[in-house]
Image (cartoon, rainbow, N blue to C red):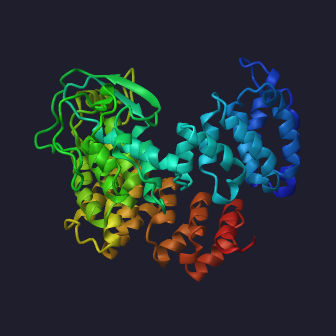
Amino acid sequence: MIGAQARLYSDADAADAVRVLLGLAAGLWTARSLEPAPELDAVHALTRFGSSLPASAVDPVLALLEPRLASGDALTSATADLLVTLYHAVPGRRGDLGGIIGQQLALPGCPGSLWEAVATLPAQARGPVAAPVAALADAGDRRALLTLARWGRPTAAVQLAARRACAHLLREQLAESRTTWSLTSQFDDTVILLLALAGAGTLTSVDPRDLLPGAGPAVTTGTWLTLTTPAHPSPGPAGHHQATPGGPSGPGGPPQPGAAGHDVGAAAGPTREPDPQGLIAAGPPDALAAAVAGHLLAIAESQYPPAFVRSEALWALYSLAGQLSPDMNGQLAGRFLAIAENPAYTGHDLAELASQDALSRGRLDAGARGLPVLALVCAATAIGRAAEAGGGTLPAGTAQRVITHAVRLLHSPDRWTVKHAAIAVAVASRSEPSLNHYGTALIVHPSGEVRGIAASIAVLDQTMQRVLAADPSPDVRMRLAARAGELDQDVLAALRADTHPDVVRAMAAATGYGA
C-alpha cells in the first residue's frame, strides 16, 4: 500500500515512510523464497519512491546489500532496481553507488534490468559508470556496446560492431523451405548500433574484409522464442508483394537459395576478397541505413516468416525512420500501409489468431494480432518524416488511408491495439493541416491512455487543450503540462492551479513554475 501511494507523499512524509520500509527490509537475504516475503515487498516499495528517496537512505541501503556484495554475487533484479533508483535520486552519492553498479555490470549474472537502467541514464548521470561500461565494450560485451550506442558514444568498438551487425543482417536470405524461426533481438540491436554509427562525428575506417564472416566476433543476440513450422507454408493471399532484400534504394537483389537467418559464407571463414554485403557495410552510414531498411522491409513484406518475425522487423524500421531520407520514407509509407491492409498471414499465424477466440481452451499470442496496427504506426511515422520535407514523394491520400484504418481500430477490445492505433492517428494527423481535426477522436475516447496520447503528440487547438486540461485522469493532465510551451494562457493557468503531484512536477519541469 505504501509503495502504491509513493508518488503522493510529500518530501517529509516520504522520508518517514522510507525509514519504516528500510526497517522492514532487514533480513531480506534470509527470507524463504516459498513463503510470503514482506522484506522483498519493502524493497519493491522503496523503489517506487523514485526521485523522492532521501540521501539518508543511501547508507542503510548499502548496508542491506552488503552481504550480497561481499560474497561477489550479482544482485537480484529487485535490489538492482533499488540501487539504480537511489543512484538517480541522490546525485551527491553517485560516486559510491556508481562504483558498485560498475562492479555488478561485469558479473555474468548481472540482471538485465540493471543494464537497461544504465543504458537509459541521462547524460549528466553517466560519469561514474562510463569507464566500466567502456571497458566492457572494448572487450566485446554485447550489452556494453549497445549501452554506448544508446548513449550516442560511437567508439571505434561500437562502430566496428555496428558494421559487422549490418553485414551479418544483409547476408541473411529468405527461403520458402525455412522450418525454424526464432524471435531474437537481432533487428533491434542492429538498428541501435547503426544509429550510433550514423551519428558519429568522426568515422573509424574499416577494411571490408574485416566484416567477412569469421573475420572477427559478431554481436550476439538474445533469443526468446523458437518456432518450428511446416517445411512448405502455404503462400499468402493472391497479389501479395514479395519484396527483394535491399528495398527501394538498397542494393540487394532477389533472394538466393538458403535458409533465412543464415549468414552466407559463415562456415567457410574469411576470404581475401570482400563480399557485396561487406562493401555496403563498410560504406557511408546513410547508404548503409537505406540498405538495412530495405532488407528489413523485405522481411516484413515476405509471406514466409511468421508474424512475430515480421513484427520485429517493423519495430526496427520504426526506430530507423529518422535516419532515412524523406524520399525513402515517402516510398516506404505506402508499402507499410499495404502490409496493414493485407497482412498475408501464414498458416501458423491464422492458427494463432484462431486460438484467441473467447471460447478457446488454449491461447497463443506471439504477435500476429498486432502486425497490422504496427504497420500503421510505421506508415504514420514515415508519412510524418516525408511531410517534414514537403511530402512530395507521398502518394495522394496516404495519410487519410492510414487514419481511416487506425480510427476503426480505436474500438478494438485489445488495449495494445487501441494504444497503437491512437499513436497512428495522432502522428498521421499532424502531416497535413486538413487532418488535424482527427485528434478529436482521441480526446473523447473512453481510455485515459488514448487521451494521454492525444495530450502528448496530437495537434491541439484551444478547445482541445481546455478539454484535456479538465480531464479526470491526472496522467492526461500531466502529459498536457509537459507541452506547456505550446498551450494557451488560460490552459496554463488551469494547470498551475492543479494540485495533483504529477501535474505539479510536470509543470515545474516544463516551466520552472513551482520548482
Task: Choose between 379 and 447: the one closer to the eye.
Answer: 379
The quadrant of the image that shows the C terminus is bottom right
- Left/right placement of residue 353 relative to residue 130 reads left
Extreme-bottom residue of the structure = 489
Can residue 370 be seen in this snapshot? no
Q: Nearer the viewer, residue 278 or 55?
A: 278
| Residue pictured at 81% horizontal, 46% vertical | 96
User: What residue is rendered at 32% in x and 25% in y?
Assistant: 267
The quadrant holding residue 497 is bottom right
Answer above or below: position of 239 versus 76. below
Q: Position of residue 197 (x, y in %)?
A: 45, 54
Q: Residue furthest front?
A: 272
Report whether 122 appears left or right of 357: right
Residue 169 visible, this angle: yes
Which of these two is toward me, 65 or 380? 65
Quarter the N terminus occupies: top right
- Horizontal and vertical percent for residue 458? 44, 67
Q: How many marks?
A: 0
Q: Nearer the viewer, residue 42 or 492?
A: 42
- Residue occupying image coordinates x 37% and y 36%: 367
Across and down, in percent, residue 307 comes to 31, 36
Give the quarter of the image for residue 181.
top left
**Relative image position of residue 365 (x, y in whole percent):** 39, 31
